[in-house]
Image (cartoon, rainbow, N blue to C red):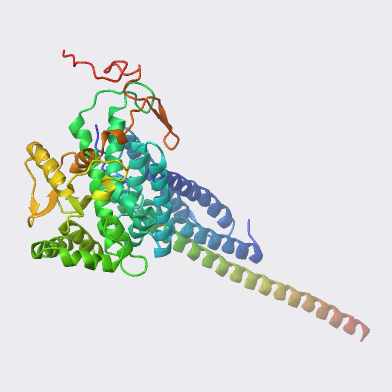
Amino acid sequence: MADPGVIALDPARLAGLEDYLQSLSDGCRRRAGRVADEVAGSGLTADHSVAELERLAAACRRERDEVAGRRALLAALPDGLPLTVRVWPSVTRARAAGDALADDVADALAAHPPGWSHLARLLAELDRSAASGPFTAAFFRALGPRRSRELPLHLERAYQRAWTAPLGADGRPRAERPYPDELTVVIAAQTRLAAALRTASLVEGPAALGPTWTRSYTGLPAADDAIAGIDAVVTDAQRREVGEVEQALRDAGYGLTLARSVARSVGWRRAAAVLTVDRGILGLVVAPLALADGDGLECDVPETVLGSVAAAMTVVGAVASLAGAPITVAAGVLSGLALVFGACRSQEARPRETRPTYDPSTGETRLPSGHQSNPHVDGAGVPLPPTYG
Amino acid sequence: MSRSPAHLAAAAEALRALADALAADFADLDGHSGPVTWEGPAAAAHRGRAAMVVFDARAVAVDLRGLADQLDQRAVTVAAAQHAEARRRQWARLEVLGARGRAEDGSDG
């Protein structure tokens, strides 16, 4: 397949460019005729201008054909290209757009269950503006600390659901796809989300992710005296650990408020952070969140994280400990998050789905695995023994 | 077909309006083809060619304005020539009248 020579694009704008070039070409040709008419009979000659206008019209037409050709090549690509970076003309508009996107994401999360394709499309929009501090800060503020913390996990689950659904979005049985390749999609989405949070944490002033937001995000007590109370009972080793983690997160590019909050949370064993390879916060595992559904299982969160990522280590062989703290690096594997949550959540909290669910935001209907359309399980949803050959 | 000074001036104005519209149309090409729309080697090459097209369009606009100035100049010249012609005719008519008057005076005397 021919290389389209394009690494990112906004399809709608590219179509607009094509139309614009066409209108330029038409305009030049029309004006060439008018110039000739206006000058006729005046004793002057406009041949040069007319020829130049005709040449411009031809050049615009050629560019339009070029763009149309590229568009055809791009349309033939199996995977869509990433969207181009969006530049906001003003802080106010960036914030408004961040708020609006957060509302959309909240709506998507409110759907049961959130659809992967819808979430991925929304996160692609976030990624377009991830370099804008005001946008990302407004997004995470409007989304709220709890949903921000849960979003990576929802992504992973939505993807798993989309993967295990017996029917594709078009209602037909899905073709087999290589799982490890697909897995990188989730990791990439989570990593981009982490990068957006890092940008947002650097915003200062009234629009910043304030102490209240970060404490709620990390699951710490909201009041300062409560923090002081905890701080009084932690050991010197833990206090040292807090400092080291905070410094490491600062080095990784996080803002002071968020870095300090996460470091305290980790040092005081309130939460464990799962990091990306470049030490972005992929997700936080917070004990109260794990038990949010009520009758959850009690578990030592950091121990579980270490255990689950140690299990992942056999797959990847790349787990780095950060200054001995229970911060782990999940590199290129199904991040530790789902494993941890799987360990901390009781099975009763997840009722078996028996009826098809319809997601109005994506128009997808998901069937439970025990549905008769799934040839890989029996009527009760129990997987059939694998057949080879 | 020769044209009146008013026609020539109107044509000059029309050419200026055309030049303005042309410049305005092409002014937005950068915005349409910029990195917000697409990125990559093909996009960069397109932007290079688009910049040349914009430059050429500006040159054409300048050209058209020059043409409009020439039309204005031509209108002034034609108006002056028409004025001189009108004066010449008026003088000629006066000459005729004067000669006729003198002839009448002579016949009387």
Q: Quadrant of residue A325?
A: bottom left
x and y, in percent, of residue B45 in the image: 28, 49
* Image point (19%, 61%), residue name: A264
Quick check: A320 left or right of B60? left
Q: Is residue B29 left or right of residue A238?
A: right
State whether residue A270 is above or below residue A225: above
Q: Quadrant of the N terminus of chain A?
A: top left
Does A192 sit above or below residue A172?
A: below
Q: Indicate the quadrant where residue A386 lies.
A: top left
Vertical comparison of A227 with A321: above or below:
below
What residue sits 51% from the left and 61% below the top?
A: B20
Image quadrant for the C terminus of chain A? top left
Q: Is residue A150 visible?
A: yes
**Viewer-side residue, A269 vs A46:** A269
Where is residue A222 shown, x and y percent of the image? 31, 62
Q: Is residue A61 visible?
A: no
Residue located at (50% from left, 56% from top): A46
For this rendering, which residue is in front, A328 or A170? A328
Q: Position of residue A117 (x, y in %)?
A: 35, 37
Spot the residue most to the bottom.
B109
A297 horizontally vs A146: left or right: left
